[in-house]
Image (spheres, helix red, strand yellow):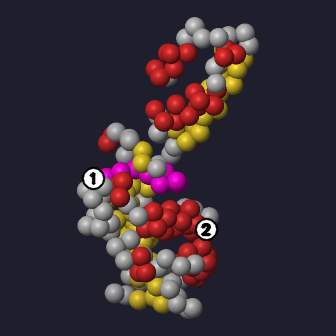
Amino acid sequence: MEGLRYLLGENLLSIDLKNVEKRILFDYPELEKIRISRTFPDTLTIDIKARMPIAKLRLRKPYFIDSDGAILDLPLEEQNNDLPEIIGLENKILNYHNIKRGYLNIALTLIREYSKIKISKEYKIENINLADPTQTFFTIRVDSSGLDDKEAIKVIIGKEDIAERLKILSILLSKIKSNLSNIKYIDLRFKDPVTGKN
């Protein structure tokens, strides 16, 4: 790491490791955690954990975010098209710095809880729409014909009881799996889920 050159020639015992860790985290925001330890007589060992993108956030320009909502500066060629895209905030927020954490927390909770249910590997989230948090919805792609043709199903989840509603979705999709080509939306905001064709 270029930012550690100032430590060359320093007495190993006089280095404040916690301050060095803070400085590195400040200089390299793409790192989530860092731990520095001394190995005598003359070595510092650095263990780092990089932040991993879990979603794309579309504002005036696209951003990648991790599970904490931290912005990751990744080159365009590293963009992962399998990541869900968070949309619906483009006209409400000019840039990432004035985003309301409540909005983003809905999407982060949804992504985290969705990864815990059985169907998450089979039905990937395509996007999460936060334009109206009370009517938050996401779309998933389903194989409707047994071929490569996949259609989107809109899943309206709202902003309450996300984990419970996703468990209901998992059960529902496993029950109606053979009939998914007839479904365009699933509304989970009610005691009994509502499905429809429009």
In the picture shown, does residue 113 fall above or below 181?
A: above
Question: Residue at coordinates 56% horizontally, 62% vertically from top-left?
Answer: 112
Callout 1 environment at 10 Å: few (<14), some (14 to 19), or many (20+)?
A: few
- Circle 2 sits on which residue? 117
Q: Is residue 52 magenta?
A: no
Q: Relative to the observer, which residue lies in front, 116 or 30?
A: 30
Can residue 147 be seen here? The reply is no
In the picture shown, does residue 70 fall above or below 5?
A: below
* Region in magenta: 62-69
In the picture shown, does residue 8 fall above or below 62?
A: above
**Residue 136 percent coordinates (x, y):** 42, 76
In the picture shown, does residue 97 fall above or below 112?
A: above
Q: Relative to the observer, which residue lies in front, 38 or 129?
A: 38
Q: Secondary structure at mark 2?
A: loop
Sequence order check, earlier mark of 1 and 2:
1
Q: Give the quarter of the figure containing the C terminus.
A: bottom left
**Residue 59 percent coordinates (x, y):** 30, 58
**Residue 121 percent coordinates (x, y):** 55, 61
Callout 2 environment at 10 Å: few (<14), some (14 to 19), or many (20+)?
A: some
Q: Is residue 39 left or right of residue 192?
A: right
Which mark is on residue 61?
Answer: 1
Q: Relative to the observer, which residue lies in front, 106 or 163?
A: 106
Question: Residue at coordinates 44% horizontally, 55% vertically from top-left?
Answer: 55
Q: Amino acid at mark 1?
A: Lys
Q: Is residue 99 left or right of residue 41?
A: left
